[in-house]
Amino acid sequence: MGIQKVKGSLEDLIEKAGGCAVVDGGFATQLEKHGATINDSLWSSICLINDPDLIKRVHLEYLEAGADILVTSSYQATLPGFVSKGLSIEEGESLLKKSVKLAVEARDKFWDDKKRISGHSYNRALVAASIGSYGAYLADGSEYSGCYGPNVDLDKLKDFHRRRLQVLVEAGPDLLAFETIPNKLEAQQFKISKIYKLQACVELLEEENIQIPSWICFSSVDGENAPSGESFKECLDIINCSNKVSAVGINCAPPHFVQVLVQKFKELTGKVIVVYPNSGEVWDGRAKRWLPSKCFDDDKFKLFATRWRDSGAELIGGCCRTTPSTIRAISKAELKIIYQSVCVCVSSVSFKVDQNQSKDEDILHHVE
Ligand SMILES: C[S+](C)CC[C@H](N)C(=O)O
Ligand SMILES: N[C@@H](CCS)C(=O)O
Ligand SMILES: [Zn+2]
């Protein structure tokens, strides 16, 4: 059965947004900006217990900045993770539901306020329930390495994901966001477990007959290869076989990888392409801190968002270490207007504006 195109679906949002919708930015980053301490095995999801009001505040800040899609606070929220904190399964399930509820409440409040104002430029946002990888739950940074150990097989991964998936879907998000699927694997046994990971997500969507759209995003540490060390083609071949997955792409990888990866993904799939890279800083899983590296500032995000759109991305945002100001810059980028091929004559010099590219000094090619 195909994805139901209900009102408010991902495709409708993209169309309303003019062909490219904006995903929010670094959720944990913005919690920290407000003073939250997230150095914890639950990482940003500890705020579901400690400070739910702050979660809602951060969602509202991203909406105000122009996000069309909110990603929930459940990235590192898992039932075994909550149980290890002394909570019961019921309490854990209630916190998972709360992650969706907080985002839905923020979206509804924001939209109720905005729709009273004539001429505003916002869309009614969608809520994507975040499903972090098994590596996120391990809380050792292995979402960037894929090192899950030799004992992780398909059944274990499906067991790990199944109940959380069911609970999150029951809570009523608009879509599911599988995030930060690891990309680089260093040993054969991990290769096997990572490709299983991918199958686990796809198989679960089928087995649970999930009726809302999903995206699956990979991390990348070399800008070239797929999760498990195998080619992206191999991974996308699995995803392409599932009509439960609407979009596929990259998150929490350095932004300078994105252009080439969008082009590559565009060749490998007909699905919507979603990209929300981090700032370029690198996560040190042992020290639990971000290390400085080559970064994009907000202006660069704005410039490159247009290029990513021109290459075929239809969902663009930011991940770790990006902030509402990054999302504001992306939402102000020329993501919507498609120019037809025209010649503009300026005195005796003419410039050609490429078809399907947006207004950007870089795409004005001198054609004397
Ligand atoms: C996206 S990473 C920076 C999240 C934190 C990681 N799973 C850890 O707990 O170390
Ligand atoms: N949605 C998560 C992704 C972490 S890689 C967050 O922004 O915190
Ligand atoms: Zn991230």
Image (cartoon, helix red, strand yellow):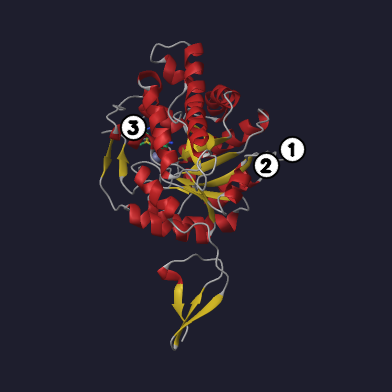
> Could you tell me the amino acid type at mark 2?
Asn
Q: Is residue 246 above or below residue 87?
A: below
- Mark 1 CB in 8 Å range of ligand 2? no
Location of the N terminus by quadrant is: top right
Q: Earlier in the sequence, mark 3 or mark 2?
A: 3
Circle 1 residue: 1
Q: Nearer the viewer, residue 31 or 319?
A: 31
Circle 3 residue: 31
Circle 2 residue: 243
Q: Which residue occupies 53% across, 30% down?
A: 153
Instruction: Look at the image and tell me whether residue 222 can be seen.
Output: no
- Mark 2 CB in 8 Å range of ligand 2? no
Residue 360: image quadrant is bottom left
Ligand 3 rendered quadrant: top left
Q: Nearer the viewer, residue 168 or 70?
A: 70
The Cα–Cα distance between marks 2 and 1, rounded to whole angstroms, is: 7 Å
Q: Which residue occupies 31% across, 46% down?
A: 281
> Could you tell me the amino acid type at mark 1?
Met
